Image (tube, helix red, strand yellow):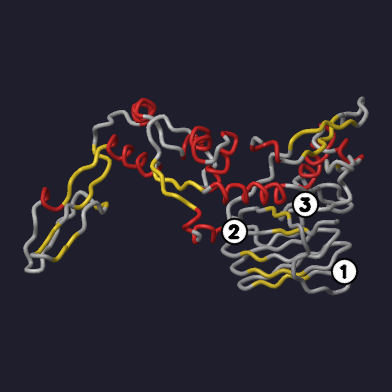
Amino acid sequence: MSYFSYFPNVYVGEGVNNDQNYRYRLVTNLFRRVKVREDLNKFVTQFEAYSVREGDTPSSLAKRFLGDEFLDWVILICNNITDFYEQWPKTDYDLQKYVNSVYSDPNSVNHYETQEAIDGTTIITKKGIEVLESYRTVMPDGTVLSAEQSRYPVSNYEHEVFKNEVKRQIVMPTRGLADLMVDEFEDLIAYDPHPELDDVNNKKTPLSIAARFIDIAGFVTASVSRQSAATSTTTFDYGPSGQVATSGSVGVADTSSTSTTTSTTSTGTAASSTSSGTSSSTYNSGTSSSSSSSSSSSSSSSSGSSSSSGSSGSSGSSGSSGSSGGSYGGGY
Protein backbone atom coordinates (compact mmCIF):
# COMPACT_ATOMS: atom_id res chain seq x y z
CA MET A 1 0.00 0.00 0.00
CA SER A 2 1.14 3.57 -0.69
CA TYR A 3 2.12 5.98 2.09
CA PHE A 4 -0.98 8.18 2.15
CA SER A 5 -3.37 5.24 1.96
CA TYR A 6 -2.72 4.67 5.68
CA PHE A 7 -3.77 8.20 6.66
CA PRO A 8 -7.22 8.73 8.22
CA ASN A 9 -9.86 11.03 6.82
CA VAL A 10 -11.42 14.17 8.25
CA TYR A 11 -14.51 16.17 7.31
CA VAL A 12 -13.74 19.80 6.43
CA GLY A 13 -16.56 22.32 6.82
CA GLU A 14 -17.76 24.38 3.89
CA GLY A 15 -20.57 26.83 3.26
CA VAL A 16 -20.08 29.23 6.15
CA ASN A 17 -21.25 32.28 4.21
CA ASN A 18 -24.59 33.81 5.14
CA ASP A 19 -26.26 32.66 1.91
CA GLN A 20 -25.10 29.03 2.18
CA ASN A 21 -26.02 26.03 4.27
CA TYR A 22 -23.42 24.03 6.20
CA ARG A 23 -21.85 21.15 4.29
CA TYR A 24 -18.80 18.95 4.69
CA ARG A 25 -16.09 17.57 2.38
CA LEU A 26 -14.22 14.35 3.24
CA VAL A 27 -10.43 14.74 2.76
CA THR A 28 -7.25 12.96 3.84
CA ASN A 29 -5.77 14.32 7.06
CA LEU A 30 -2.24 15.20 5.94
CA PHE A 31 -1.36 16.88 9.24
CA ARG A 32 -0.62 13.58 10.98
CA ARG A 33 2.95 12.26 10.98
CA VAL A 34 4.81 9.34 12.51
CA LYS A 35 8.58 9.22 13.00
CA VAL A 36 10.96 6.40 13.82
CA ARG A 37 11.80 5.79 17.47
CA GLU A 38 15.02 7.48 18.49
CA ASP A 39 16.43 4.27 19.97
CA LEU A 40 15.86 2.25 16.80
CA ASN A 41 19.40 2.85 15.62
CA LYS A 42 20.61 0.66 18.48
CA PHE A 43 19.29 -2.39 16.67
CA VAL A 44 22.15 -2.47 14.17
CA THR A 45 21.30 -5.97 12.99
CA GLN A 46 18.03 -4.65 11.57
CA PHE A 47 19.75 -2.20 9.20
CA GLU A 48 22.23 -2.39 6.38
CA ALA A 49 24.46 0.51 5.36
CA TYR A 50 24.03 1.52 1.75
CA SER A 51 25.53 4.19 -0.53
CA VAL A 52 23.02 5.58 -3.00
CA ARG A 53 24.20 5.15 -6.58
CA GLU A 54 23.51 7.26 -9.63
CA GLY A 55 19.88 6.72 -10.65
CA ASP A 56 18.74 5.10 -7.39
CA THR A 57 15.34 6.22 -6.11
CA PRO A 58 13.48 5.29 -2.92
CA SER A 59 10.97 3.23 -4.90
CA SER A 60 13.65 1.34 -6.84
CA LEU A 61 15.51 0.53 -3.60
CA ALA A 62 12.25 -0.56 -1.93
CA LYS A 63 11.57 -2.91 -4.83
CA ARG A 64 15.09 -4.37 -4.67
CA PHE A 65 15.49 -4.73 -0.90
CA LEU A 66 11.91 -4.96 0.45
CA GLY A 67 10.09 -6.54 -2.48
CA ASP A 68 7.50 -3.76 -2.75
CA GLU A 69 8.09 -0.43 -4.47
CA PHE A 70 5.26 1.14 -2.46
CA LEU A 71 7.34 0.74 0.70
CA ASP A 72 9.61 3.59 -0.38
CA TRP A 73 8.24 5.62 2.54
CA VAL A 74 9.76 3.08 4.96
CA ILE A 75 13.24 3.85 3.64
CA LEU A 76 12.61 7.61 3.87
CA ILE A 77 11.31 7.40 7.44
CA CYS A 78 14.24 5.27 8.58
CA ASN A 79 16.61 7.97 7.31
CA ASN A 80 14.48 10.86 8.61
CA ILE A 81 14.02 12.27 5.12
CA THR A 82 11.04 14.61 4.93
CA ASP A 83 12.00 16.54 1.77
CA PHE A 84 13.05 14.26 -1.07
CA TYR A 85 14.24 17.10 -3.32
CA GLU A 86 16.58 18.57 -0.70
CA GLN A 87 17.66 15.54 1.34
CA TRP A 88 18.02 12.84 -1.31
CA PRO A 89 21.35 12.91 -3.23
CA LYS A 90 21.18 14.65 -6.59
CA THR A 91 22.34 13.20 -9.87
CA ASP A 92 25.46 14.70 -11.46
CA TYR A 93 23.32 16.60 -13.96
CA ASP A 94 20.97 17.99 -11.31
CA LEU A 95 23.93 18.91 -9.09
CA GLN A 96 25.53 20.91 -11.90
CA LYS A 97 22.29 22.79 -12.51
CA TYR A 98 21.85 23.47 -8.80
CA VAL A 99 25.39 24.83 -8.32
CA ASN A 100 25.10 27.12 -11.34
CA SER A 101 21.77 28.48 -10.11
CA VAL A 102 22.97 29.16 -6.56
CA TYR A 103 26.49 30.53 -7.14
CA SER A 104 27.51 33.23 -9.61
CA ASP A 105 31.01 31.68 -9.71
CA PRO A 106 31.06 27.98 -8.82
CA ASN A 107 34.88 27.97 -8.81
CA SER A 108 35.31 30.78 -6.28
CA VAL A 109 36.46 29.96 -2.74
CA ASN A 110 33.70 28.87 -0.38
CA HIS A 111 35.91 28.30 2.69
CA TYR A 112 39.28 26.93 3.79
CA GLU A 113 40.12 23.58 5.41
CA THR A 114 43.20 22.42 7.28
CA GLN A 115 46.01 20.40 5.78
CA GLU A 116 47.19 17.41 7.78
CA ALA A 117 50.23 18.29 9.88
CA ILE A 118 52.40 15.48 11.28
CA ASP A 119 55.33 15.69 13.70
CA GLY A 120 57.11 12.36 13.42
CA THR A 121 54.32 9.85 14.08
CA THR A 122 52.03 12.32 15.88
CA ILE A 123 49.21 14.05 14.03
CA ILE A 124 49.25 17.71 15.04
CA THR A 125 46.35 18.84 12.89
CA LYS A 126 43.74 16.67 11.18
CA LYS A 127 42.81 17.29 7.57
CA GLY A 128 39.47 18.80 6.60
CA ILE A 129 38.71 21.11 9.56
CA GLU A 130 37.08 24.34 8.38
CA VAL A 131 39.20 27.37 9.30
CA LEU A 132 39.70 31.03 8.39
CA GLU A 133 41.90 32.16 5.53
CA SER A 134 44.41 33.60 8.01
CA TYR A 135 44.92 30.25 9.78
CA ARG A 136 48.49 28.97 10.18
CA THR A 137 49.58 25.70 11.78
CA VAL A 138 52.04 26.00 14.67
CA MET A 139 54.27 22.97 15.26
CA PRO A 140 55.37 21.81 18.76
CA ASP A 141 58.82 23.39 18.30
CA GLY A 142 57.25 26.78 17.52
CA THR A 143 57.64 26.59 13.76
CA VAL A 144 54.80 28.30 11.89
CA LEU A 145 53.89 26.58 8.64
CA SER A 146 53.14 28.56 5.50
CA ALA A 147 49.62 29.26 4.26
CA GLU A 148 49.79 26.46 1.67
CA GLN A 149 51.07 24.00 4.30
CA SER A 150 48.41 25.02 6.81
CA ARG A 151 45.16 25.16 4.82
CA TYR A 152 43.73 24.75 1.34
CA PRO A 153 40.78 26.45 -0.41
CA VAL A 154 37.49 24.68 -1.13
CA SER A 155 35.45 25.98 -4.06
CA ASN A 156 31.68 26.33 -4.11
CA TYR A 157 31.36 23.35 -6.44
CA GLU A 158 33.59 21.14 -4.26
CA HIS A 159 31.58 22.16 -1.20
CA GLU A 160 28.28 21.12 -2.81
CA VAL A 161 29.77 17.86 -4.09
CA PHE A 162 30.87 16.97 -0.56
CA LYS A 163 27.40 17.70 0.86
CA ASN A 164 25.83 15.57 -1.87
CA GLU A 165 28.16 12.66 -1.09
CA VAL A 166 27.17 12.77 2.57
CA LYS A 167 23.52 12.37 1.54
CA ARG A 168 24.39 9.15 -0.29
CA GLN A 169 25.09 7.34 2.98
CA ILE A 170 21.78 5.84 4.14
CA VAL A 171 20.58 2.75 6.00
CA MET A 172 18.27 0.09 4.60
CA PRO A 173 15.87 -1.76 6.95
CA THR A 174 15.54 -5.52 6.70
CA ARG A 175 12.30 -7.03 5.45
CA GLY A 176 11.33 -8.18 8.93
CA LEU A 177 11.79 -4.69 10.36
CA ALA A 178 9.88 -3.17 7.43
CA ASP A 179 6.88 -5.44 8.06
CA LEU A 180 6.92 -4.51 11.76
CA MET A 181 7.09 -0.80 10.91
CA VAL A 182 4.10 -1.07 8.59
CA ASP A 183 1.96 -2.67 11.32
CA GLU A 184 2.93 -0.10 13.94
CA PHE A 185 2.59 2.78 11.50
CA GLU A 186 -0.99 1.83 10.69
CA ASP A 187 -1.90 1.83 14.40
CA LEU A 188 -0.08 5.08 15.23
CA ILE A 189 -1.38 7.09 12.28
CA ALA A 190 -5.00 6.21 13.04
CA TYR A 191 -7.20 8.26 15.37
CA ASP A 192 -7.58 7.38 19.01
CA PRO A 193 -11.17 6.63 20.15
CA HIS A 194 -13.09 9.90 20.10
CA PRO A 195 -16.77 10.99 20.10
CA GLU A 196 -16.29 12.83 16.79
CA LEU A 197 -15.45 9.60 14.90
CA ASP A 198 -18.14 7.92 12.83
CA ASP A 199 -18.62 4.21 12.17
CA VAL A 200 -15.73 4.07 9.65
CA ASN A 201 -13.38 6.22 11.80
CA ASN A 202 -13.78 9.41 9.81
CA LYS A 203 -13.48 12.49 12.04
CA LYS A 204 -16.24 15.09 11.85
CA THR A 205 -16.24 18.22 14.01
CA PRO A 206 -19.67 19.94 13.96
CA LEU A 207 -19.55 23.48 12.60
CA SER A 208 -20.45 26.33 14.94
CA ILE A 209 -22.66 29.32 14.20
CA ALA A 210 -19.75 31.50 15.37
CA ALA A 211 -17.93 30.61 12.15
CA ARG A 212 -20.29 32.94 10.28
CA PHE A 213 -18.90 35.94 12.18
CA ILE A 214 -15.17 35.21 11.90
CA ASP A 215 -12.98 36.67 9.14
CA ILE A 216 -15.75 38.71 7.59
CA ALA A 217 -15.80 42.46 6.89
CA GLY A 218 -18.10 43.37 9.78
CA PHE A 219 -15.91 41.56 12.31
CA VAL A 220 -12.74 43.30 11.15
CA THR A 221 -14.40 46.72 10.99
CA ALA A 222 -15.59 46.42 14.57
CA SER A 223 -12.06 45.75 15.76
CA VAL A 224 -10.73 48.79 13.92
CA SER A 225 -13.45 51.02 15.37
CA ARG A 226 -12.60 50.04 18.92
CA GLN A 227 -8.97 50.90 18.36
CA SER A 228 -9.84 54.25 16.83
CA ALA A 229 -12.05 55.16 19.78
CA ALA A 230 -9.18 54.61 22.19
CA THR A 231 -7.10 57.31 20.47
CA SER A 232 -9.83 59.95 19.96
CA THR A 233 -9.31 63.59 21.04
CA THR A 234 -10.37 64.45 24.61
CA THR A 235 -12.39 67.66 25.15
CA PHE A 236 -12.60 69.64 28.39
CA ASP A 237 -15.21 71.71 30.20
CA TYR A 238 -13.70 75.04 31.23
CA GLY A 239 -16.61 76.25 33.32
CA PRO A 240 -19.28 78.95 32.92
CA SER A 241 -17.06 81.22 30.79
CA GLY A 242 -17.34 78.77 27.89
CA GLN A 243 -13.79 79.48 26.75
CA VAL A 244 -10.24 78.88 27.86
CA ALA A 245 -8.95 81.66 30.12
CA THR A 246 -5.40 82.90 29.78
CA SER A 247 -3.08 83.92 32.56
CA GLY A 248 -3.52 87.65 31.88
CA SER A 249 -7.29 87.66 32.30
CA VAL A 250 -7.30 87.52 36.10
CA GLY A 251 -5.00 89.94 38.00
CA VAL A 252 -1.78 91.68 37.00
CA ALA A 253 1.41 91.18 39.02
CA ASP A 254 3.58 94.06 37.80
CA THR A 255 2.67 96.35 34.92
CA SER A 256 6.22 97.70 34.59
CA SER A 257 7.84 94.34 33.90
CA THR A 258 7.87 92.45 30.65
CA SER A 259 5.99 89.18 30.90
CA THR A 260 5.33 86.19 28.72
CA THR A 261 1.83 84.74 28.78
CA THR A 262 1.57 80.96 28.87
CA SER A 263 -1.59 78.93 28.76
CA THR A 264 -1.53 75.32 29.96
CA THR A 265 -4.31 72.78 29.80
CA SER A 266 -4.19 70.02 32.37
CA THR A 267 -6.08 66.73 32.30
CA GLY A 268 -6.03 66.47 36.08
CA THR A 269 -6.36 68.60 39.22
CA ALA A 270 -3.14 70.28 40.27
CA ALA A 271 -1.95 70.53 43.86
CA SER A 272 -3.44 73.55 45.63
CA SER A 273 -4.55 74.87 48.97
CA THR A 274 -8.23 75.65 49.35
CA SER A 275 -9.81 78.48 51.33
CA SER A 276 -13.61 78.97 50.98
CA GLY A 277 -13.76 80.12 47.41
CA THR A 278 -11.02 82.73 47.64
CA SER A 279 -7.53 82.76 46.21
CA SER A 280 -4.42 84.53 47.42
CA SER A 281 -1.07 85.21 45.79
CA THR A 282 2.24 85.70 47.59
CA TYR A 283 5.20 87.44 45.94
CA ASN A 284 8.81 88.13 46.73
CA SER A 285 9.83 91.73 45.79
CA GLY A 286 6.30 93.12 45.42
CA THR A 287 2.79 91.96 46.15
CA SER A 288 -0.50 91.82 44.40
CA SER A 289 -3.66 89.89 44.88
CA SER A 290 -6.31 88.48 42.64
CA SER A 291 -9.64 86.80 43.14
CA SER A 292 -11.68 84.29 41.24
CA SER A 293 -15.15 82.90 41.52
CA SER A 294 -16.45 79.38 41.98
CA SER A 295 -13.01 77.81 42.60
CA SER A 296 -10.36 77.27 45.22
CA SER A 297 -6.73 77.77 44.22
CA SER A 298 -3.44 79.18 45.37
CA SER A 299 -0.26 79.98 43.50
CA SER A 300 3.17 81.37 44.22
CA SER A 301 5.83 83.09 42.15
CA SER A 302 9.05 85.04 42.59
CA SER A 303 10.72 88.19 41.14
CA GLY A 304 7.51 89.98 40.19
CA SER A 305 5.69 87.06 38.58
CA SER A 306 1.93 86.84 38.44
CA SER A 307 -0.47 84.02 39.15
CA SER A 308 -3.94 83.31 38.02
CA SER A 309 -6.68 80.83 38.58
CA GLY A 310 -9.45 79.52 36.42
CA SER A 311 -12.99 78.40 37.12
CA SER A 312 -14.56 74.94 37.47
CA GLY A 313 -11.68 73.20 39.18
CA SER A 314 -8.78 73.73 41.53
CA SER A 315 -5.31 74.40 40.22
CA GLY A 316 -1.97 75.84 41.14
CA SER A 317 0.84 77.37 39.11
CA SER A 318 4.20 78.92 39.67
CA GLY A 319 6.42 81.13 37.53
CA SER A 320 9.76 82.91 37.74
CA SER A 321 11.80 85.74 36.18
CA GLY A 322 8.89 87.85 35.07
CA SER A 323 6.90 85.05 33.43
CA SER A 324 3.35 84.14 34.22
CA GLY A 325 1.59 80.81 34.01
CA GLY A 326 -1.94 79.53 34.28
CA SER A 327 -3.32 76.03 34.85
CA TYR A 328 -6.89 74.76 34.55
CA GLY A 329 -8.49 71.61 35.77
CA GLY A 330 -10.53 69.59 33.35
CA GLY A 331 -14.22 69.21 34.08
CA TYR A 332 -14.62 65.47 33.27
> Mark 2 Cα within 10 Å, few/some/many (few <14, many 20+)?
few
Q: CA distance from mark 3 to mark 2?
A: 21 Å
Please state which of residues 108 and 82 is positioned toward the viewer in this rendering: 82
In the rendered view, tell whether residue 304 sits above or below residue 6.
Answer: below
Q: Percent position (x, y) of residue 34? A: 64, 49
Among the two numbered marks 1 and 3 on one chain, the one whose residue lies closer to the N terminus: 3
* Residue identified by numbered label 3: 245
Residue for point 79% across, 48% down: 234
Residue for point 80% across, 39% down: 10
* Residue identified by numbered label 2: 257
Among the two numbered marks 2 and 1 on one chain, the one whose residue lies closer to the N terminus: 2
Quadrant in the picture for residue 30: top right
In the rendered view, tell whether residue 31 sits above or below residue 104.
Answer: below
Q: Amino acid at mark 1?
A: Gly
Q: Amino acid at mark 2?
A: Ser
Q: Amino acid at mark 3?
A: Ala
Image position of 36 (left or right of 140): right
Report helix, strand or loop for mark 3. loop
| Tag in front: 3 or 2 | 3
Q: CA distance from mark 2 to mark 1?
A: 29 Å
Report helix, strand or loop for mark 1. loop
